[in-house]
Image: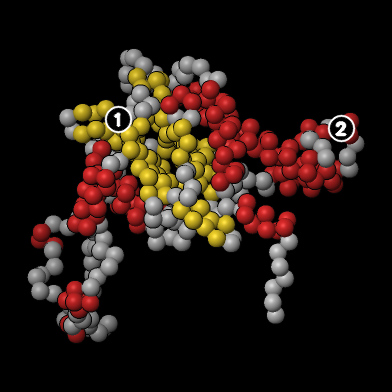
Amino acid sequence: MSRPPLSTRDFKRLLERRKPMTICIAAICQQDKNNDQKRIVLCHDWKSETDIGGSETADKQRELPKGWVALMADTMHRCEELIAQYERHLRGLGEILDDRQLFEEMKIPAHNQKQLLANDYLRQMMGISYADLVSPDKKIPESVVEDRLEEVANIQLRASLILAGFVTTQQSDTPEKERHPYLFVVEDSKEHQDVVRVEENFAAVGSGSYVAIPAMHQRAHEEDKSLMETIYTVLEAKRLSQVVPGVGVDTTMHVMYPDGSLKRWSNELYDRMDWLFDRLGPKLIITDKKSKEYFEFRDEYLIPFDAEEEEEKPKDTSLRRSASRTPKQGL
């Protein structure tokens, strides 16, 4: 049975429906052991998909006022709307006194976007605003009000952002104001909890984050790691996340400095990272010859479950093992 052709309306909806499949990563670090000036490494893929196709043509990085940068994931047109809210708010933002004020300020654009979505939904459904819906003067039936309020409560931003920037704030452990790096994640859910949150060390959004975040933890990334080590760690996490459907292979990487300036990676750095990945990264492809050598099975590797000659004890499978715990050569 053939499927009926799509109407023009349905076709446009499919084109506008961006799948939340992507990866964006940001990580705080310092230049090196001899220079503790902070840097922020930014990385994203270029994959954009709809229900009828996809391509690696989506630039997911935007420069915002006051030296902030946004990385985008999830529904792209919703991301652009949310970024517009942050552009407007940051442009009019004055001096920041401390972290508490900064955290509150970074929540306001997300709140404004949710209000806009609620009003847009109600105007499309009923031709009225949220204020009209809850106004007693309109005398809307209570059951209708309750149903609409429940629907509004289920509206999600459908946009995920990483906001990275340096802000001059007063910290409790320093006598004077200094420029400090900050990472904010804007990411909604059905529960609407921690929609805007601050992250330490690193942040990742998009479907590929389920692979990238464990990879960053595997390398034990902290903000005192050097710039070169952090670039490798971020790139490794991004490359590993490419196993997730919808995450693209094309990659952009920038480094942000305390003055808000950005530098992009050169071909020389790309070649160096590729060289490091071949030596430090997991082997994603193993030749038949190496596979036979590495994975040859021997009968002594497994013993009967009730064998008495060897007491069953949990084995230490940590990755950082001393030389004394190294398996014997030839196994």
Tally the marks. 2
State if disc 1 and disc 2 touch (CB < 8 Å).
no
Q: Is residue 299 above or below residue 221?
A: below
Foreground of the two, 280 or 1: 1
Direction from residue 56 to residue 264 in the image, left or right:
left
Identify the residue at horizontal 32%, vertical 21% (top origin). Answer: 173
Give the number of the disc on residue 38. Answer: 1
Percent from the top left, x then y, of residue 214?
A: 36, 53
Identify residue type, mark 2: Pro
Q: Nearer the viewer, mark 2 or mark 1?
A: 1
Give me the residue at 34% from left, 26% from top: 258
User: With respect to residue 123, does 207 lie above or below?
Assistant: below
Q: Quadrant of residue 192?
A: top right
- The alpha-carbon separation of the residues under discs 2 and 1 comes to 54 Å
Q: In terms of secondary structure, where does tag 2 sit?
A: helix
Quadrant assignment for the N terminus: bottom right
Whether residue 131 can be seen here: yes
Circle 2 residue: 136
| Image quadrant in which the C terminus is located | bottom left
Q: Which residue is drawn at the image coordinates 84% and 46% (left, top)? A: 144
User: What amino acid type should be assigned to the residue bearing mark 1?
Assistant: Lys
First in residue order: circle 2 vs circle 1: 1
> 217 or 248, which is in the foreground?
248
